[in-house]
Amino acid sequence: MGKSKSDEAKEIQRIRSQLLREMSQTELKPQEKEELKMRYGLEDDQPFTLGEIAIFFNVTGEEIERVENIALRKLRRTRLSSA
């Protein structure tokens, strides 16, 4: 039996809260934090595409993807070092 939509929504919110908490404990640059918040809809439940974020920051989608990957690696390192 699958999860109800309510259970799924709660799980998604739990994951978002956990990610925001981990972001606050990681040495991320302000732009890295903002990009992750936008990319995954962490503040308003409305994720943006790479292209939309690129327009917002006036850079290429490739640059946004590069910064996103760096930020995610930092988060993974923080998670592994605290485990």
Image: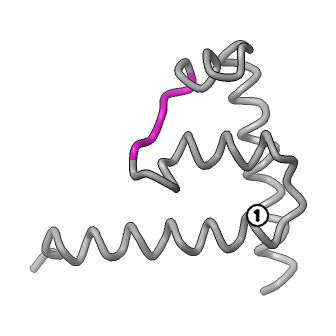
Under mark 1, the amino acid is Arg
**Nearest the eye: 28 or 66:** 28
Which of the 4 image quadrants contains residue 55? top right
Most distant residue in the bottom direction: 83
Tell me the magenta residue range.
Answer: 46-50
Can you tell which quarter of the image residue 69 is in? Answer: top right
Query: Which quarter of the rendered picture does the C terminus lie within?
Result: bottom right
Residue 76 rendering spot, x and y as whole percentages: 76, 63
Quadrant the N terminus occupies: bottom left
Q: Position of residue 25 (x, y in %)?
A: 81, 72
Judged left or right of residue 70, residue 7 is: left
Name, please, the residue furthest toward the left: 1
Task: Say which of 71 and 37 sits in front.
Answer: 37
Q: Crowding near pointer 1: few (<14 within 10 Å), some, many (20+)?
A: some
Q: Position of residue 53 (x, y in %)?
A: 60, 26
Left or right: 8, with 46 as reference point: left
Q: Secondary structure at mark 1?
A: helix
Residue 37: percent from left, percent from top: 60, 49
Task: Give the vertical position of 77 relative to 1 (above or below).
Answer: above
| Vertical placement of residue 12 versus 74, above or below | below
The residue shown at (65%, 18%) is: 61
Q: Quadrant of residue 79?
A: bottom right
In the picture provided, is 29 more to the left or to the right than 10?
A: right
Task: Identify which residue is drawn at 76% across, 68% down.
Answer: 24
Q: Is residue 42 above or below residue 24?
A: above
Q: Is residue 11 above or below residue 41?
A: below
Question: To which residue does mark 1 refer?
Answer: 76
For the rendered model, the colour scheme is one colour
The residue located at (73%, 49%) in the rendering is 33
Q: Is residue 19 magenta?
A: no
Taken as a whole, is the magenta stretch helix, strand or loop? loop
